[in-house]
Amino acid sequence: MLNRQIDLISLGWNKWFEAQADLCASHENTFARVAAVDRDQFLLINQTGQFRAKMSGHFFYQHEQSHEFPCVGDWVCVTKNPTDDFALIRSLLDRKTSLRRRSVGDGHGYQMIAANVDYIVIVQSCHYDFNLKRLERYLVMVTEGGAEPWVLLTKTDLVKPAILDSQLSELRASGIAAPVFPLSNMTREGVDEFIRMLLPGKTYCFVGSSGVGKSTLINGLIGRDMLETNNVSGTGEGRHTTVRRELILLEGGALVIDNPGMREFGILGADSGLGGSFSDITSLAAACRYRNCSHTNEPGCAVIKALEAGEIGVEHYDNYFKLSEESAFSQMSYAEKRKKDRDFGKYIKLAKKDLKHD
């Protein structure tokens, strides 16, 4: 974090949070933003600088789920006494935007990635990491959380111009409307143009698989090697070393959050996210003959007609249904999911019994 005079507005404070100022009515309390989380400890920052904090006992026992605890990017109300080693987090302000994913190994829980982010920069390498289906998955969850998505294609120096042109054409053909920025950390081509897009007081969260160049780019934005990186592998891909999320204030005034690599990104209930990321399909659906059209085999289906005419791609169409089904399953209650799993188990047992009789 930079050693210079800052205020809450430069850290992302706005009218959304100002409307919740009554949460810190006492003169002993103040607001701060979560810059990093280390188990049960938090690194906070406000106009006084950085300091450590813990959740107060009352706050901790009032919240049972991990997603109810502060995460990177959150605004919290704290009590900070000069003589104490740790400030105490009293309350958590409502989140304006969020990025979350389904918890690993937990069919009904979710994990907070970051909060109060203005732009989420989805990073893919042009070299080995370019994956349209995974990108669409990211876009669904970004849109659902309320932030604006950007797409960053790195390592353009490792592919031929024709391959990059093909990837850009593939993005356009899929109906992705998010801004796309191709660049190379090695040659610096496209980097300056990207930096000029970063606005003071706005928060940018970088997500993507390991080794795609997120930390290298952020190191360049910071102007020093604050985030650890490793040398590239024999394939040209980086070896990722980021182990925690951290909010960093840049010299130009923008705030960035680096993330450990995430190849898997479990979908939660994301109807609005699907509408934003698959706007071409949802727009066509409005012209279907039947309001409850499933877009599979109904007569007068505008989506099927566009698919047959080549106006939308088959993979794009298939991915829409896959993510729709995953979103619907995520929205089911835990009891409903358990029943569905049991019904499927019974089906498997009956199928095996029929095979034995045959």
Image (cartoon, grey):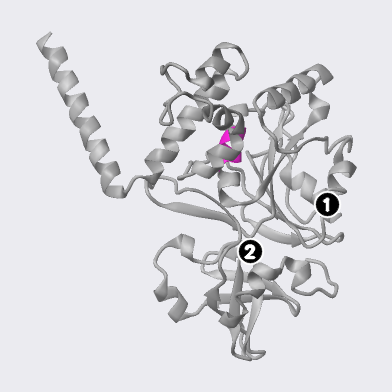
Nearer-the-camera pick, 269 or 15: 15
Q: Percent x, y for residue 28?
A: 62, 90
Instruction: Please tell me whether residue 195 is drawn above or below residue 184 in the rendered image.
Output: below
Q: Where does label 1 land, which residue?
A: 221
Instruction: Identify the residue at horizontal 57%, vertical 71% (top origin).
Output: 93
Give, as a single range, the part of the protein colored magenta.
Answer: 135-140
Nearer-the-camera pick, 161 or 295: 295
Q: Percent x, y for residue 16?
A: 65, 68
The answer, for residue 263, to whether it is visible in the render is no
Instruction: Identify the residue at horizontal 57%, vertical 51% (top origin).
Output: 145
Q: Where does label 2 land, which residue?
A: 36
Q: Residue furthest left?
A: 357
Nearer-the-camera pick, 14 or 165: 14
The answer, for residue 355, to whether it is visible in the render is yes
Instruction: Identify the residue at horizontal 51%, vertical 69% (top origin).
Output: 40
What is the distance, in whole Å, between disc 1 and disc 2 at their CAs?
A: 19 Å
For badge 1, the amino acid type reads Leu
Q: Report whether 7 appears left or right of 264.
A: right
